[in-house]
Image (cartoon, rainbow, N blue to C red):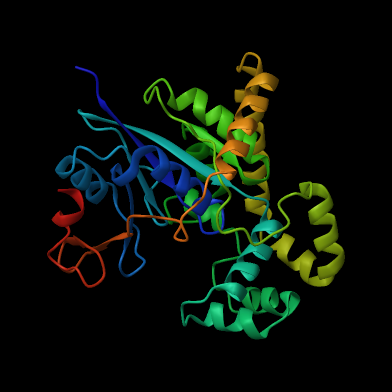
């Protein structure tokens, strides 16, 4: 009997997760679940496995803090997907997002609203917040270290490696892989949560940011040397997969036409129709804020 396929989206903050999450919900509706630990802890493999075993209709699962070392079970085949982003581009996106977000009282959000970009990045680096210091490397080690060799090994073992500034190419590659498990998958999208100059080529954008940031930009690069190695490796992985796609140019063109068609459709004000689920380790419960003991409601 074939294993049940479940797509795991490892959602690194400000790595196109809202747009891709919208894509997953558009494909799988309530069978795409977004879940995080209520206290921001790593969501361990056993918790994820137990949840999916309890709710077998789930087809896709997104999380900000999920252990990437999760392995298949006797009944479930996990298809791992992750987005990697150029570190300076990611840092600037964190600033733009926090500066414009309407909710949240975190220090990072409050500082973004009163600081300029350069000052904000300096604050992150000086206080070692973890948001702008080899963050993607740490994620790829399962939040255990910043061992770049372990991170690259885990990246290479990820089924679908996407690059934020090569989003369309990444989606075409992802479709090719996922349609073997989900024949009707359609990853065309309407961009969500846009806070940066997405139409500017990445080199041009980063060159402009480096000039703007000066010494701060060099500090940011120094604090992300491992993430730059991860970014380079992700691009290599994408290039390798691209070579295996027949008629890529036509597929890319058709994919972009599908995206244009979606942009002409009226989109609801809320990015997601279904709320984020939370896990509370002290209660060993899954719930929505204010819905403790009522998590069944969503899945019935």
Seen from the viewer's position, the closer of residues 156 and 177 is 177
Image quarter where the N terminus lies is: top left
Left or right: residue 24 versus residue 4 is right
Left or right: residue 11 versus residue 273 is right
Residue at horizontal 17 percent and vertical 59 percent from the top? 295
**Image location (x, y in percent) of residue 120:** 67, 77
Q: Is residue 230 above or below residue 144?
A: above
**Image location (x, y in percent) of residue 95:** 64, 70
User: Which quadrant would residue 235 be assigned to in this image?
Assistant: top right
Q: Is residue 156 above or below residue 103?
A: above
**Image location (x, y in percent) of residue 111:** 60, 83
**Image location (x, y in percent) of residue 300:** 14, 48
Left or right: residue 116 versus residue 141 is right
Left or right: residue 285 versus residue 168 is left
Q: Is residue 159 visible?
A: yes
Residue at horizontal 60 percent and vertical 29 percent from the top? 255
Q: Is residue 237 visible?
A: no
């Amino acid at each position: 009997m074939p294993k049940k396929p479940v797509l795991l989206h490892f959602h690194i903050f400000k790595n196109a997760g809202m747009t891709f999450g919208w894509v997953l919900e558009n494909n799988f509706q309530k069978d795409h679940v977004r879940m995080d630990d209520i206290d921001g802890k790593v969501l361990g493999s056993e918790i994820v496995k137990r949840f999916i075993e309890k709710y077998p209709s789930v087809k896709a699962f997104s999380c900000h803090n999920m252990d990437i070392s999760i392995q298949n079970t006797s009944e479930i085949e996990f298809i791992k997907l992750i987005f990697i982003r150029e570190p300076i581009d990611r840092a600037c996106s964190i600033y733009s997002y926090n500066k414009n977000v309407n909710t949240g009282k975190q220090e990072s959000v409050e500082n973004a609203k009163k600081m300029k970009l350069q000052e904000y990045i300096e604050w992150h680096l000086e206080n070692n917040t973890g948001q702008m210091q080899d963050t993607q490397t740490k994620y790829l080690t399962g939040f255990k270290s910043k061992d770049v060799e372990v991170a690259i090994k885990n990246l290479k073992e990820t089924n679908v490696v996407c690059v934020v500034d090569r989003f369309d190419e990444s989606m075409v590659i992802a479709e090719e892989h996922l349609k073997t498990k989900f024949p009707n998958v359609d990853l065309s999208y309407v961009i969500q949560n846009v806070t940066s100059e997405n139409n500017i080529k990445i080199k041009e954008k980063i060159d402009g940011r480096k000039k703007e940031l000066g010494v701060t930009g060099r500090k940011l690069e120094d604090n992300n040397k491992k993430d730059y190695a991860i970014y380079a490796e992700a691009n290599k992985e994408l290039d390798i997969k691209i070579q295996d796609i027949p008629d890529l140019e036509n597929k890319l063109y058709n994919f972009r036409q599908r995206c244009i068609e979606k942009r002409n459709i009226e989109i609801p004000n809320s990015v997601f129709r279904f709320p984020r689920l939370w896990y509370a380790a002290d209660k060993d419960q899954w719930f929505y804020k204010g819905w403790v003991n009522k998590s069944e409601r969503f899945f019935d």
